[in-house]
């Protein structure tokens, strides 16, 4: 990616209202608290493995001090299932650095009670390998079935089973699984507004895009992800009935045109008239005007960037409202 300047880019709501966490701060002043999050975890038998993990990583002190946190707390059964999916026999066998980031992926640095939770993206306190500054994003979906995190257990996420255990320094919501650090692929799967993109990535005649974007080869990735409405508009534009009608080579080239490899490009690194070189081989151009950010593709079509900096462990996602097409 070529850039002459660094400019900040807006963070817009995508599809539904997001609640955005404040930046994390591990340097809390030590304060005696009668009912801290750590106190509750320490006093709850079903959190004994979580308590062990917090103590091993030193995060017990963070959650025992002043601050404002929301903790999605896995039960002992959740940690047992987590260990069974790893090479490790116990919490003490998990490398400390890895365990710390897994735990921080369950914490946001503001208090959000059940009534305040809304569907959308929120920042956790974890950092993956792709970025040293942009913390991992979490996608939370709230509906009549409850609160689902990152698409649920089948996608490396979890569901809230008990909400609003209140502490002096925040709130605990109990979850049924340990939440894995999301990949670009699992972030796409978690968000129903990107389901057509997932269908395109996993179409039988395509390369294993889902596997590629879940892995580390050629990572980190920067993905410009079209919404469902963007794909619907593309089909109308091309006078096609459905996704299956897009020719194999056309779809493959189009999907590759939305991916930048070996770079985790954040919104602050985008500049006006920047040329973005893609995995497909062609480039597109960024446009910035005030709070508006656009992309002009190889076919001279313009799309808007509607959400930015959705961080995964192996890359970052920016959501766009129109499918990009390379030059013919």
Image: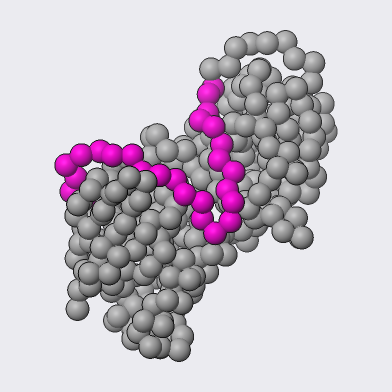
Relative to the observer, which residue lies in front, 228 or 39? 228
Which span of residues is magenta-colored?
1-26
Relative to the observer, which residue lies in front, 7 or 155? 7
Which image quadrant for residue 32?
top right
Q: Is residue 109 visible?
A: yes
x%, y% of residue 62? 61, 21
Which quadrant is the C terminus positioned in?
bottom left
Residue 304 left/right relative to 325? right
x%, y% of residue 164? 78, 38
At x 43%, y 55%, the residue is: 306
User: Magenta part mainly helix, strand or loop?
Assistant: loop
At x 52%, y 28%, the residue is: 24
x%, y% of residue 66? 66, 17
Which image quadrant for residue 298?
bottom left
Q: Is residue 20 part of the magenta span, yes or no?
A: yes
Q: Is residue 49 visible?
A: no
């Amino acid at each position: 990616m070529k850039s002459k300047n660094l400019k900040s880019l807006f963070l817009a709501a995508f599809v539904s209202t997001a609640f955005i966490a404040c930046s994390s701060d591990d340097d809390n002043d030590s304060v005696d608290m009668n009912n801290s999050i750590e106190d509750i975890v320490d006093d709850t038998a079903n959190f004994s493995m979580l308590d062990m993990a917090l103590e091993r990583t030193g995060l017990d002190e963070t959650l025992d001090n002043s601050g404002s946190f929301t903790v999605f707390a896995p039960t002992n059964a959740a940690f047992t299932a987590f260990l069974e999916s790893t090479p490790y026999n116990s919490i003490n066998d998990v490398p400390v650095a890895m365990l710390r980031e897994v735990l921080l992926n369950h914490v946001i640095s503001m208090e959000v009670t059940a009534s305040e939770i809304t569907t959308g993206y929120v920042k956790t306190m974890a950092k993956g390998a792709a970025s040293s500054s942009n913390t991992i994003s979490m996608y939370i979906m709230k509906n009549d079935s409850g609160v689902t995190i990152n698409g649920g257990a089948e996608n490396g996420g979890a569901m809230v089973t008990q909400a609003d255990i209140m502490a002096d320094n925040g709130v605990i919501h109990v979850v049924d699984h340990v939440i894995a650090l999301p990949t670009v692929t699992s972030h796409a799967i978690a968000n129903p507004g990107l389901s057509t993109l997932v269908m395109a990535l996993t179409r039988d005649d395509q390369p294993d895009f889902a596997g590629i974007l879940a892995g580390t080869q050629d990572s980190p990735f920067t993905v410009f992800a079209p919404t469902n409405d963007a794909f619907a508009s593309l089909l109308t534009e091309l006078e096609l009935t459905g996704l299956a009608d897009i020719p194999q080579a056309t779809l493959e080239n189009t999907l590759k045109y939305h991916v930048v490899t070996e770079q985790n490009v954040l919104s602050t690194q985008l500049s006006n008239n920047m040329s973005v070189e893609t995995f497909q081989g062609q480039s597109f151009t960024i446009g910035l005007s005030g709070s508006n950010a656009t992309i002009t593709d190889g076919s001279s079509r313009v799309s808007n960037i509607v959400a930015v900096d959705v961080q995964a462990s192996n890359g970052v996602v920016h959501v766009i409202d129109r499918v990009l097409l390379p030059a013919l």
